[in-house]
Image (cartoon, rainbow, N blue to C red):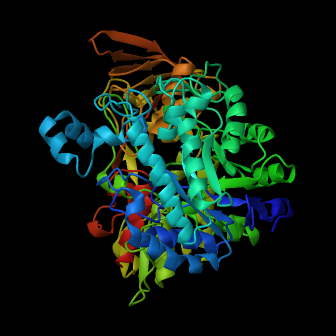
Amino acid sequence: MDTRLKPLFTPWKIGNCEIKNRIVLTSMGGTDLFGWMEKNHFDKEGARFIMEVAKNNVGLVLPGCQPIYNPMFGQWLHKNKKMYRDLAAWMPEFHKTGAKLFIQLTAGFGRSFTISSMMEMLYTTPVIRTLSKPFMNLDKITASASPSPNRWSDKVPSREMTRKEIDQMIYSFAESSRLLKEAGVDGVEIHAVHEGYLLDQFTLPYVNKRTDEYGGSMENRYRFATEIVKAIKAKCGSDFPVSLRYSVISKTKGFRMGALPGEDYKEVGRDMAESEKAVRLLQDAGYDMLNCDNGTYDAWYWAHPPIYMPENCNLEDAEHIRNFTDIPVVAAGRLDPFVAAKAIEEGKLDGAGFARQFLADQEWVTKLMDGRGDDIRPCILCHNGCFNMCHYKGVPNDQDLMDSLHLARCAVNAETMQWNKHYIKPAAKKKTVAIIGGGIGGMECARVLKLRGHNPVIYEKADKLGGTFIPASAESYKGKLRDLLAWYRREMTRLGIEVHLNTEITDTHSLGADDVVIATGAKPRKLNIPGFDKTIEACEYLNGKETGNRVAIIGGGLTGCEIAYELALEGKDVTIIEMKDDLIAQKGVCLANSSYLREWFALHKTPVYLEATLKEVRDASVVIAQKDGEEKEIPADSIISSVGYIPAPLSGADKSHLVGDCLSVGNLRSVIWRAYEVTMKI
């Protein structure tokens, strides 16, 4: 192990509970032990994930948050006694790993509850609204500190919670904690004065307008959170550890308006001055640890940092707040293990929180300890598999039901939380399989085939492996994507996979293979517009083609916006032209990712033309038709086309063996999962 990491592997205490090292798995929806958005039960899939992480040298494990009042079916968490007995039977095996387990309990989401189009229909249709209450009572589960707009939808506002509802929740927190303690759990974490969830909504002045004992002064706004820990301690004893998930600063300008890193803004939520006082109030109430990040759902990119956010984005604020409390402080959010170790060594931090990296590779801590950092499959911060709640103008959460019900899957690791669907099954008969195309899809096929016992052979027409993922990972801020590409290339070497570079295949019949997989990708879409051939295609730019200072981007989807962001970071004058009524109006892109880019362009006054149609490309300008039909000429030294791609399969191939964009243009998740599924069947 690199000696710089040693501070991460020293013991520490939360109250009287000793933790063997400083690495904390922070909670993620979908890794729950009592189920997620379904009837409460001891969840074997969640337990398997938690056990895998615990076996791989994590000190403190926090499963996904458990609503004490389940949004689905309206169950109170403390009422299903069987699942606590099942948990008690499982706990001895867990404790053999040496890890400690804190269960995270949540009051819920309030105005942050992710509303879908179906939910809007349930709420706005009176008859259906009444009939649906037994399994989804939106009026109850979206209730907040005060009447307020939902983060995702204008059609499902939040009403004010009643005092009776608050009392019911406090009782359930305490009773659920008692049952968890009796089951052998080491502690609980309260979720959360954090990220703009329900408890946080009570603390935030821009949401909480109450005039009773839960509104007004700071003590009143934090009363809900402090009464919870007092009730737990009264029922479980003062020595039972209770952590609090806590956002140091809200980083919020208003409803649906976040504050970007470095932005000069007026805080409407919790600023640092209040936080310095609040942490002492929370400690004095009985909390034994603060598990910290920043942000709210209105500034979601702080709590769920996309690739555009700085590394260690929440660390400085967590370090600062530690000066105002005597209880341990954990930081999370794009945290680098080496930076975290240094902060712990210097006494600025007590624990290091990590989440999504465990979805990509449950063994990453063990690999780090063994000096095998290069073998860690990296998280690329995409949210495509784990947290792809998507939102754009006029559309609430645009997310497939399968994704909504099954969070905590991983775009780069098809097996995570899908072990019954994706697994390595030894081949009944060894085959030689030709793979045409050495991009991510082709390499994932080769990897899985080799692990199953087959003999995969890659044929790639370029001089290196990677395909379109090479330009896709080219921007300056995409180091994690380049790490993934390097991981795949190393896997090809480690597994001894035969690779033929600079080899273009036009006829698969001459290869003498038992099976053939086609992974030839897609080709750029071209518009039938005068002068369109003057444009620079997106991948041409990403592969190194120079641009002038004034650049027009045709297409405001994710690729176009990421290119615009890169050019703007370089100091170039960028204009984005998009046919739809919002930027990144596409399914599968998490709101944390898309809102960062939209708000960044707005802050930096990047010209954006929405509902605009490209009419002509000229030598030094583009002509567009705006929504009202008026034409406008926009000066540009260079024009980049990012208008999408169309599948480019090799002719004569068996369609059942098409993988990636040559079958259907998607994202990295669709490429990797499809590759895994195809090669399972060979």
Q: Residue furthest bottom?
A: 429
Q: Is residue 195 visible?
A: no
Instruction: Give the x, y percent position of residue 502.
Output: 54, 62
Q: How many marks?
A: 0
Q: In the image, is 270 to the left or to the right of 417?
A: right
Instruction: Answer with the quarter of the image where residue 103 lies.
Output: bottom right
Q: Depth check: 169 or 193 in front?
A: 169
Instruction: Give the x, y percent position of residue 148.
Output: 39, 26
Q: Depth check: 118 or 445 in front?
A: 118
Instruction: Give the x, y percent position of residue 43.
Output: 42, 69
Q: Can residue 147 be seen in this view?
A: yes
* 64 shown above or below 561: below
Instruction: Answer with the quarter of the image where residue 22 lies.
Output: bottom right
Q: Depth check: 666 or 172 in front?
A: 172
Q: In the image, is 533 to the left or to the right of 478?
A: left
Q: In the image, is 285 to the left or to the right of 214?
A: right
**Residue shown at 62%/42% (left/top)?**
246
Instruction: Answer with the quarter of the image where residue 80 lies.
Output: bottom left
* 661 shown above or below 325: below
**Residue shown at 67%/28% (left/top)?**
274
**Residue shown at 40%/44% (left/top)?**
389
Q: Depth check: 43 or 657 in front?
A: 43
Q: In the image, is 75 to the left or to the right of 101?
A: left
* 353 shown above or below 153: below
Name the quadrant of the N terminus. Answer: bottom right
Instruction: Give the x, y percent position of residue 548.
Output: 59, 23
Q: Residue furthest front?
A: 234
Name the quadrant of the C terminus. Answer: bottom left
